[in-house]
Image (cartoon, rainbow, N blue to C red):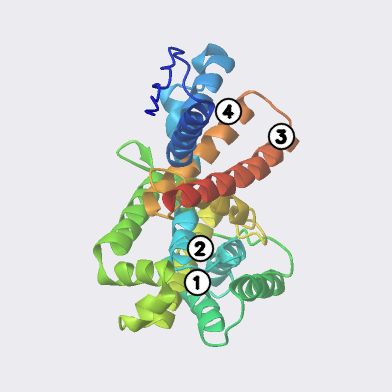
Amino acid sequence: MTTTTLPEPVSTDPTPPAGGALRARSRGGNIALKIVSKYGTLIAMAIMLVIFGFAVPNGAFLSGTNLLSIVNQSALTAIIACGLTMVLVVGEFDLSVGYAASLAGVLVTGLVANQGLPLILAVVVTILIGGGIGGINGVLVTKARVNAVVATLGVGTILTGLAFGYTAGSPIVQVPKEFTYLTLARFLGIQNPIWFMAIIVALLWVILNRTATGQRIQAVGANRSAARLAGIRTDRSKITAFVIAGVCAAITGILLASLLGSGTVSAADGYLMDSFAAVFLGSATLRDGEFHILGTLIGVLVVSVGFNGLSLLGTPTFWQYIFKGGILVLAVALSTIARRYSKA
């Protein structure tokens, strides 16, 4: 007896299976998250520019003068943040950069006012001391094997004590007028801090991306064990990154003292959070969670745009702190998302 097998009926329902729809929706969500993780910082900047452009009366926010002012306000943060970027690229943390900048400010003014050093010599000595502070951090982390967070936080606290001891808690105001010209003067109509920022950021970008030293720093940060097996002296690369961060912190402190016209204890301590927010925002810009100089610069500009817009709107000071803390949390979240999807 022959058994006839009837063909299964063909469904004419155009609705795709539920599983396929879910997978398609999941793929769409993943693509959206990847876009946000890679371009979220730029999108946020564009949104803030539009909002503040409409909210601030008389178009004051988008005026050429104000936009140039935003870049000028970003200069010192960009210098210290780009130095911090080198340490984060190598896989470590430096919580002493703000304190080192504050100490540099009182040192450069004190060496001129109290010790009678010529201004140029005082600046050079202060930068060398900043590099020495970075070197101490690097040695503590690499040779003494102290956790970077603990080591740099401890060093930063010591620096605060030294600054108070050197100044007895009083600002140093006897500074020569030419010292203030470092930041108050202009070249080709552009404020000097912008030129300093451009030179230092460009130099650090070249070091990190176009030199053997920079390639070693990136290799150590990517995989320390593989870098060691490849013959790279990992400890030396880490110390180099810390030294660069110390030098950038010292330069920031010198320029801040010039801007204020005095050396003040704790004047630059606030740059610590600003620089971390900028670096983590930058890591979620154009790259998949990687720290890089260009991204840090963009992150600095995002923070400055927010601060400037809030200031022009006359918002209370506490909103600036809320914005600063919120942007740091958002920056770390975007960076984490970017790293996650770069490995997917």
Dot 4 amino acid type = Gly
- Residue 179 lies, in percent from the top left, at 47, 56
- The answer to whether 308 is drawn above or below residue 139 in the figure is above
Q: Can I make out residue 271 in this image?
A: yes
Cβ atoms at labels 3 and 1 below 8 Å apart: no
- The span from disc 1 to disc 2 (Cα, nearest Å) is 7 Å
- The residue carrying mark 2 is 249
Dot 3 amino acid type = Trp
* Residue 196 left/right relative to 180: left
- The residue carrying mark 4 is 309
Mark 4: secondary structure: helix
Cβ atoms at labels 1 and 2 below 8 Å apart: yes
- The answer to whether 323 is drawn above or below residue 8 in the figure is below
**Residue at image point 62% right, 53% down:** 273
Q: Which mark is residue 130?
A: 1
**Residue at image point 57% right, 33% down:** 306
Q: Which mark is residue 89?
A: none
Q: Can I make out residue 77 in this image?
A: no
- The residue carrying mark 3 is 319
Q: Residues within 10 Å of mark 2 (few under 14, many from 20)?
A: many
**Residue at image point 50% right, 60% down:** 254
- Pick the residue in front: 31 or 206: 31
